[in-house]
């Protein structure tokens, strides 16, 4: 089954590129850029990856991103993720990046986006890997700062397919970004937002009704509202669920408690994703394998999850048909 899950053609729709920064690369970049890390070794750093909640993780994650300084750093970060994808048969990716994490410490928007998108272009050329880059706003920052970031993105709109909303959900509800999302939509950008990860089901409803998102990131707490689950099924709204993230951040106390397969079985368009694999103990295959071990996920369920990822991706209609075809071929 583990081989079956690894070799299955997959797509990843919820992945923070800064969350793919492995400790070894963090140390290498720190040395190259003359930055002091508050850890003596890779082992000591890894020992700190013991999170009580989302905020514990975010504090470490923003600190780790400090080592990213040059366009080449962002290229190498993205390339390392692409190599993991290659090894795990991930054929389409829609990574998030957090420009504000970098621009707020003096790194230019262009440095960040050019490094990431050059790696994505190379992956397309060399391996035929398709992708779409999504720019996230940090929700703990202000609406004005999000508008400023959207302005900085203007000269780079050819490299971005959509916008997202991440960081601390508690205390920063979707309503705060209603006008920014409306503006982004008017610019032709697709919309996603983290909602119902640590925050209540109401945040999922508000992300749909106030932000008009095309997909919900996480959304696992939607299951606390049976009416909302019915709506997600009826309106075919995809959730980009991240199993290992949810257990590492204590959204579920144990993988055996995870609700992804229950939602799949009632018809919610759930997908499997790795969120921040360098911090949560695994890439896409490891997330599928964890579901198999804890929830006895069947091959049919795994294939259905994958199919959802292809169908609810932001790839072109032709590419979607091609990817679903590859999955059908794999099944038989
Ligand atoms: N940024 C990176 N990972 C995140 C997550 N799981 N939730 C919110 N913001 C994030
Ligand atoms: Zn996320």
Image (tube, rainbow, N blue to C red):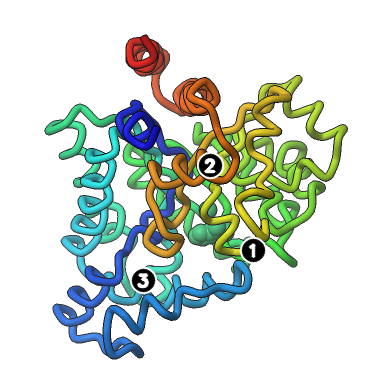
* Neighbour tally class for label 1: few under 14, some 14-19, many 20 plus, Cα within 10 Å: some
Q: Up-down: is 250 above or below 187?
A: below
Upstream in sequence: badge 2 or badge 3: 3
* Neighbour tally class for label 3: few under 14, some 14-19, many 20 plus, Cα within 10 Å: some
- The answer to whether one can see residue 318 in this image is yes
Beta carbon at label 2 within 8 Å of ligand 1: no
Residue 298 lies, in percent from the top left, at: 53, 27
Residue 16 lies, in percent from the top left, at: 43, 54
Along the line of sight, which residue is nearer the eye, 234 or 254?
254
Residue 225 lies, in percent from the top left, at: 85, 41
* Alpha-carbon span between mark 1 and mark 3: 23 Å
* Alpha-carbon span between mark 2 and mark 3: 29 Å
* Quadrant of the rendering where the N terminus is positioned: top left
Beta carbon at label 3 within 8 Å of ligand 1: no
Foreground tag (1 vs 2): 2
Rendered image: mark on residue 250 = 1
Rendered image: mark on residue 65 = 3
Judged left or right of residue 149, residue 321 is: left
Q: Residue at x 47, y 23 (%)?
A: 303
Residue 145 lies, in percent from the top left, at: 55, 65
Which secondary structure lies at badge 3?
helix
Judged left or right of residue 231, residue 118 is: left
Foreground tag (1 vs 3): 1
Rendered image: mark on residue 291 = 2
Foreground tag (2 vs 3): 2
Q: Residue at x 30, y 59 (%)?
A: 112
Upstream in sequence: badge 1 or badge 2: 1
Upstream in sequence: badge 1 or badge 3: 3
């Amino acid at each position: 089954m583990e081989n079956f899950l690894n070799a299955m053609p997959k797509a990843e729709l919820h992945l923070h590129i800064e969350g793919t920064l492995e400790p070894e690369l963090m140390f290498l970049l720190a040395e190259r850029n003359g930055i002091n890390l508050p850890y003596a070794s890779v082992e000591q750093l890894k020992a700190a990856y013991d999170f009580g909640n989302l905020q514990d993780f975010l504090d470490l994650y923003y600190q780790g991103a400090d080592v990213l300084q040059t366009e080449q750093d962002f290229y190498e970060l993205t390339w390392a993720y692409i190599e993991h994808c290659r090894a795990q048969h991930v054929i389409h990716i829609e990574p998030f990046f957090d420009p504000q994490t970098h621009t707020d410490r003096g790194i230019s928007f262009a440095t960040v986006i050019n490094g990431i998108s050059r790696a994505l272009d190379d992956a397309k050329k060399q391996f035929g890997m398709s992708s779409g880059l999504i720019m996230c706003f940090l929700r703990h920052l202000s609406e004005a700062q999000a508008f400023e970031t959207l302005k900085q993105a203007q000269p780079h709109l050819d490299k971005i397919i959509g916008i997202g909303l991440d960081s601390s959900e508690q205390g920063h509800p979707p309503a705060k970004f209603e006008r920014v999302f409306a503006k982004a939509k008017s610019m032709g950008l697709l919309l996603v937002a983290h909602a119902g990860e640590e925050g209540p089901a109401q945040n999922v409803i508000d992300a749909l009704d106030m932000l008009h998102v095309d997909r919900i990131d996480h959304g696992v707490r939607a299951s606390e509202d049976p009416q909302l689950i019915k709506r997600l099924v009826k309106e075919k709204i995809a959730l980009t669920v991240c199993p290992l993230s949810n257990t590492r951040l204590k959204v579920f106390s144990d993988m055996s408690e995870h609700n992804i397969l229950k939602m799949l079985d009632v018809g919610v368009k759930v997908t499997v994703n790795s969120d921040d694999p360098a911090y949560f103990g695994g890439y896409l295959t490891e997330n599928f394998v964890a579901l198999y071990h804890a929830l006895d996920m069947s091959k049919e369920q795994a294939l259905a999850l994958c199919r959802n990822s292809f169908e609810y991706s932001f790839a072109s209609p032709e590419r979607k048909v091609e990817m679903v075809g590859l999955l059908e071929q794999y099944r038989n």
